[in-house]
Image (cartoon, helix red, strand yellow):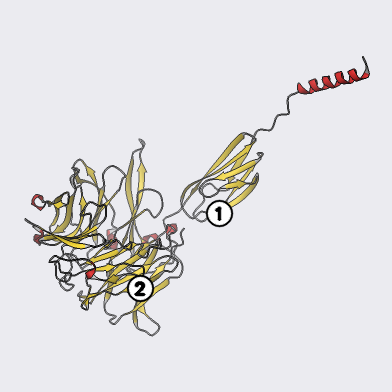
Amino acid sequence: MNSLKRIIILLSLIVLSSCGEDPEPLDELVVELNASNENPNYNTPFTLTWSSNASQCYASGPLWSGEKELSGSEEFTIKRGGNYTFILECRRNNEFKNQAVAISVNKTLQDHFIFDATEESLLTYPLADDSLNYSITSFQRGDFNNDVFGDLFIALEARNINGGFEETLFFQVNGGAETGAYLVDNVVASGEQCQGSRVLLRSDINSDGFDDIFVATSDQDDTSVGQTACLFMGSATGFSADNSAIQNDTDFDFFSTEIKFAQLADRNSDGLPDIYILTNDAEYWIIRSEEPALEKVEIENSILSDYTITSGIIFDFENTGSESHVFTGYDSTNSPAYIVVPVSGVATEWENLAVYLDVPLTKHIQILDFDSDATLDVLVLGDENINLPSTTGASSLLRVYEYVDTNFLDSYIELDLLSERGINLSTEIYIQDFDLDADGGDFIIPVNTASGVTDNFFLGLKQANSDDDGIVTYSFDSYTDKLIGIPNFDFENKPNILSDFNFDLDLDIVVISESLDANGDSVLEILLKENLSN
């Protein structure tokens, strides 16, 4: 065998020998992710550290994402309570592995109200008479200038030391980057001023893309106010009073018709909110359209003149599948009643009305979804002394009614109104899940101004409770701002409105305060305290 053959045979043997050996195995793919604190308190930093022997790693979760180095650390500070999951997934060739860390952030009730140490003065309005007492009678939240930030339309009523009506002022407060407050001119026709303020309804009446406001007195207003209604039409530059903005071929008079009650309702089943106005002998409708107009429907067999109407809703009262008008009120002896009138299509069946007497004395009734079941629930607020304008009597009842069988009055949850504090609650009840715990919403209610009271607002904090069988029930814990102990909020029993003005999912607050300016003159100030919680 020659030398060339020997070399070829030798190389072949070497190759065969090499092919028979197994490749050296890789180490097991490892991904490690750890947190310095898995249960941090609100606004307290914690650190994630990680390492892997992979070739690539990617982060995912609500607070971090994207490609990461194979080892490293990152500090986080979370200002919203709740549970957060951080996931790190790594790969090597076609092999994948991930690791997750669950972080639970503890945010106390006080942590949800971290107001700025300073307040911003949005508007200073000179007062001709410093003896008058100004209070918020009603307001509407909305986006009135279409900039996606929250705004306010506020009605303030001034009364003298004897409780007599003096004047009504209207203000618009715009949120967002250019927060500001503006006095809205309330002269509507022939020099007459809009004096009603107890009822504010928001709807784009003329379908121009800007919300409008219908304003009216209520059935409870005393005779010194007078029975008045008016329209504030919205635009890009703000509101203007204009009762002529709708066609009126009826006998409705904005300055003399005695209004029992008004609310939003859909008259023509087009899914848009129209204005429903109730008097002793007629229903009036302002139909929302590009050419809005008033319509009148006469009422027969009405007993409305026997009752003072305090509030109302449209609701399937007896759980029959058909809606009814439900009007709350009381008679001349202050005995409470609910007047229930069936609705059939666009018609109200006054001939079939029913009066329920075994009901609580109610100053406000409101629909809500309390327990996320198939039926809606009802919130009811009552007072010891329900007659306006007095707010001397403490609120005595705040209940959530749920359907049981056929009558929602059979089952309810009652909130503790902290009777020892003697607070009278506004009818402007804000249902808002301010703590973002997905429980369907908490109750935030301004406290009406009254002698000897220091609280500014009431808070009903909703709690979800699960038993051993997984059945969830709900309850409420009751607080006021003074009981919470909110830093940088030293106001005492001032008119106020909580709302999110800068779209950061926490509640800022507007406060109305009477004070003296640099010249010693009495002024009304609209102040904004920004919430820095989130």
Residue extending farthest bottom: 519
Amino acid at circle 1: Pro
Q: Secondary structure at mark 2?
A: strand
Tell me what residue is drawn at x 47 percent, y 53 percent.
80
In the rendered image, is residue 118 in sight? Answer: yes
Closest to the observer, 153 or 164: 153
Residue 182 disc label: 2
Amino acid at circle 2: Tyr
Residue 45 disc label: 1
Question: Residues at badges 1 and 2 in contact (C-beta under 8 Å)?
Answer: no
Residue extending farthest right: 2
Q: Is residue 173 above or below residue 48?
A: below
Which marked residue is nearer to the observer: mark 1 or mark 2? 2
Q: Secondary structure at mark 1?
A: loop
Q: Is residue 411 above or below residue 149?
A: above
* Residue 157 located left or right of residue 108: left
Tell me what residue is drawn at x 70 percent, y 29 percent.
25
Residue 86 disc label: none
Closest to the observer, 55 or 507: 55
Mark 1 neighbour density, 10 Å: few (under 14) some (14–19) many (20 or more): some
